[in-house]
Image (cartoon, helix red, strand yellow):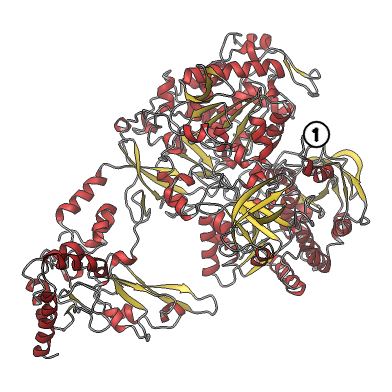
Amino acid sequence: MSSTRRDFLIKSAQAAALAVTGGLVWAYLLKQQANAAAYAIRPPGARMADDFNARCIKCGQCVRACPFDTLRLAHSAETIPIGTPYFVPRDIPCYMCEDIPCMNACPTGALDPGLEDIADARMGQAVIDIENCLSWQGLRCEICHRECPLTDKAITVEHHPRRISRHAMFVPLVHSDACTGCGICEKACPTEVAAIRVVQPELVRGRIGEHYRLGWKNAAGITEDFDAGRAKAGSPAAPTGLDYLNEGEP
Amino acid sequence: MELTRRNFLKSSVAASAAAAVGVPVSKSSIAQAAEAEKDWQWDKSVCRFCGTGCGIMVATKDGRIMATKGDPDAPVNRGLNCIKGYFNGKIMYGKDRLTQPLMRMKDGRFHKEGKFHPVTWEQAFDEMAVRFKKTYGELGPHGVAIFGSGQYTIPEGYVSAKLMKAGFRSNNIDPNARHCMASAVVAFIQTFGIDEPAGTYDDIEHTDTVVTWGANMAECHPILWARVSDRRLSSDNTRIVNLTTYGNQSSDIADAEIVFKPGTDLAIMNYLAREAIARDAVNHEFVDKHCVFATGPYDIGYGMRPTDEYAFEAEKDIQAKELEVTLDKYEAIAQRKEPGTRVKQNNTAAPVKHWQISFDDFKKGLDPYTLDFVAELSKGDPDETLESHKKKLEQLADLYLEKDRKVVTFWTMGFNQHYRGSWVNEQAYMLHLLLGKQSMPGNGAFSLTGQPSACGTAREVGTFAHRLPADMVVGNPKHRERAEKIWKLPPNTLNPKTGSHITKIMRDLEDGSVKWAWVQVNNPFQATANANHWITAARKQDNFLVVSEAYPTVSAKVADLILPTAMIFEKWGLYGNAERRTQGWREQVPPPGEAMGDVWQGLEFAKRFRLKEVWGEQPLPGLKAEGFEDGSLPDVLAAAAKMGYSPEDTLYDVLFATPENRKVAWPDAAVAKGHGNHIAERLGDGWFPEKALFNEYRVFGLDYHHDLADFDTYMRDDVRGLKWPVIDGKETEWRFNEEYDPYVPKGAGFAFYGKALKATPTGDLDGVTSAEKKPLPDKAKIFFRPYAAPPEQPDDNYDLWLATGRVLEHWHTGTMTRRVPELHRAVPTAQLYMHPEDAKARGLKRNDVAWIESRRGRIKAVVETQGRNRTPRGYTFLPFFDEGVFANKVCIDMTCPMSKETDFKKAAVKVYKV
């Protein structure tokens, strides 16, 4: 993309943003767009939605700094707040520059300068549609695994018996503790519509309960010299369960 | 950033909440997360739920469970848990946890019609003892009863059993485990002379073939099923066959699913045995050396009451079959009789009697069970062709009979909860023994258990109406004598008359022969079939029902007195799982409020009885035993005095806090390692009850085929349970096999050394021909058992089968798991699984609410026509965890007449629109 055209696009997006700027209208629009913003894949270091929206002045510095033309500013027709930066991995992913030029260009800290290593960026989260992933059908593809800049960390391959023939399947798995959401996998995916996509993690990621640890990952062993003295249990003021016990038939 | 993101995510779930939304993390929040877990204290423990017996680790802080994890060092589960196990840390924190004793009161006093009000423990025990003594005086030792449990810790079961049998001289203690694996026990005792499986879970990794019969392991033993699945995936030659009455999750990885008609498993087993003989697959060397053949009477009834006096009108037609049945076509052929023959059930009083027969007789018994006959009888899916079913049965035979193919047969409630549960269990051994595929790595018939300590406590401690510890029984004078010696009781203190099994205790409450009962660690008023009868009985004017509970349950609701009870991690305990593995844990947190452990409740109650109140002469209607006067237990106070006991001594001092046990001191720093013991501390007399009582109990099994290690060993950091017999500190993998089991004499190869029933009369298929008892030392019995038809089957009115059972997400009656919000959200209610065409024919569709009506009652549930269970036309499945649905109001309380275990799988119902 020529720098002239890029400047033009930036300016037109800014113009659209300015056109609706004005007191309550702007605030209203931000509210409306807050939900839609969850779908946007933001540049590296972007803060959480509200914080990001409050800090981003839609200046376009990050877009200018991106050497790969990955980043764009949202237009009015798009479902994310007008003028804010985002990218579409299937078109151009983030190539994970070591010096993080977009973040360094940001004048307001909407892209947090605390991000020191691009591998710690969390732009989004890759997820696999296992029904349409060729490797999950048993085909020897695994392009995502091989193309991943953090291969064997963010994407690993497991070998599962195929059962219907004497072949193993090479099944790719994404690991959220390493995936930056750069989208190189989505770009590279050979299916007609990508079977691996980057989405905002909160759209897809669950969380194990706080009451549980994975035994083979959590290293804590039996506590020697347990201190039972710290355990104090008080009696609750009112007896519980009486409503159930005293009312109605069993 | 000093910590990598990976490390950070491991260090804290709280912080990973922030990480999940893409915020670059600050050093300070990392430090906070690490700080939060720094003072967590971890210890080993055991999962609260099923019989698999997974090891877990528990983290506590300030008297609260912070987290749990699967124990990576536990051989059973290697760090994994199922979704119930995942929630061990939450089961104790339901909002309606009971924390104070509650009694029905009016005007400040106990009143049967009163509402529940909080009382002190002192008031609770006072009323409990007054009511007990009134009933005991009026009806004698068998007028009181305890509903026990397969979820008791070993010390809990031991306290209750000893208090009842040695103290109150009553055998009316029976566990919910009766509903779970009593049929398995009868078959073990009759076949091998000793209870519990020969094999271990390691059979899974050694075998080539897993055949499940009436066991949906995928949901009911999830972690074991993960091992079975891994075996299937990692070995091409391995095969899995799921025999079931409806398609379920265990079929998903199976190579074949065989859907059979309820009750016809008996016929399929005989077809397989017949094929073994026909195809010359019998291992004659093994059979000749280690086995004999046997059979017993067929006319043994169905464990129903012999009278219809208490039956609802609609129940009477089925109840009448307890006295006489008319043989249908298949049953007649299977039993070599004419169809339409009326058979009086003459052996309902002695269904367990049996005698040795010849191999030729055995063969003759099997003769009718041809492929054609069995296929036609057993086909369970009306939409499957006979040819397809036949082909599957042949393939099943191929797998079992293939000479060098190793086979493990697993079963659970489909076999055990069966009107001929003991027979069908015995048939599994019949098949494996015939083939010589038993008691060796990867080869064996393996009875799985449902509850976490059905083996360790209910069976091994003997909390049954007929049992004593270490497989001894109250009816055997030598066993009583040995128990009296170990327990330091005067001769004939122990009562020789078998007490009431758990369903009979319910019937006893209904007919007034029991008037005081104590429910411990179970919820029998929801879990017992034909529940409408028992709920009414509980509220009868002169019954007094005590329920020890952690939460308000159906049983608590019908009680007169509720005792708030400590839960698993709030006390010291040991469980024994299905592979003979005994595992122990320490108290991790104190119980909430006034809640106290069951051990303490038993010991405190024992303090309220003096020997003179229980060891004098006691009426025992119906007692007839050698050495005893008819109808009464003797006064043993004089003999007790000679042993140094005073009539004023309490049962607490004589049975529990004995001089020996008081030497086992609390605190015990070496074992406790800083952990508390709310029971020892509340007793305050310086002894360590769980340890003292476990080590006392252990004596029963030493050099008696049931050797356990001592208490301290099970608590060691480097021990994750041990499989008994534990001899010279070493556990035993495959019993009865010389290579692994030190009890087998050198050179024998195999020895089925169990001591019970090791001499029998001889006869033929029709009866005894010589009453002289022929010994069969070290041998197993191969039983011929015929097909018998279920007494209640779908008819024009009640036109569908109904089975009840579990789902993975909930444990039994849901007392604990329904208080875990996540599990409740996942499976909030019990749905009626039925075939879409059956639903359509009744004007029902998925998610409609339907009435389910049987001869015994009517309930409502939501209809499900798809999903995890795929029932054939004519068949329905309804889980029992949900008290709002209350499946047991429609289930029938018939039992296997030998084991007295209820058949929860074969009720006839009609289903219609609300």
Q: In the rendered image, is residue B492 in sight? A: no
The foreground one among B280 and A150 is: A150
Most extreme residue toward the left is A107
Position of B607 relative to B480 (above/below): above
Task: Say which quarter of the image contains residue B374.
Answer: bottom right
Position of B244 relative to B637 (above/below): below
- The amino acid pointed to by label 1 is Glu
Disc 1 residue crowd, few under 14, some 14–19, many 20+, Cα 10 Å: few
Q: Where residue B410 sits: x, y (%)?
A: 63, 56
Q: Quadrant of the N terminus of chain A?
A: bottom left
Q: Where residue B873 sits: x, y (%)?
A: 70, 65
B537 left or right, relative to B774: left
Q: Where residue A143 sits: x, y (%)?
A: 34, 82
B473 left or right, relative to A38: right
Q: In the rendered image, is residue B132 in sight? A: yes
Secondary structure under badge 1?
loop
Q: Residue at x 37, y 85 (%)?
A: A191
B808 left or right, relative to B39: right
Q: Where residue A197 sits: x, y (%)?
A: 32, 76
Q: Residue at x 33, y 64 (%)?
A: A205
User: Which chain is home to disc 1?
Assistant: B
Please give the residue where the numbered disc 1 appears in the rendered image: B309
Q: Quadrant of the C terminus of chain A?
A: top right
In this rendering, the count of numbered labels is 1
Task: Say which quarter of the image contains residue B16.
Answer: bottom left
Q: Residue at x 47, y 52 (%)?
A: B75
The foreground one among B611 and B547 is: B547
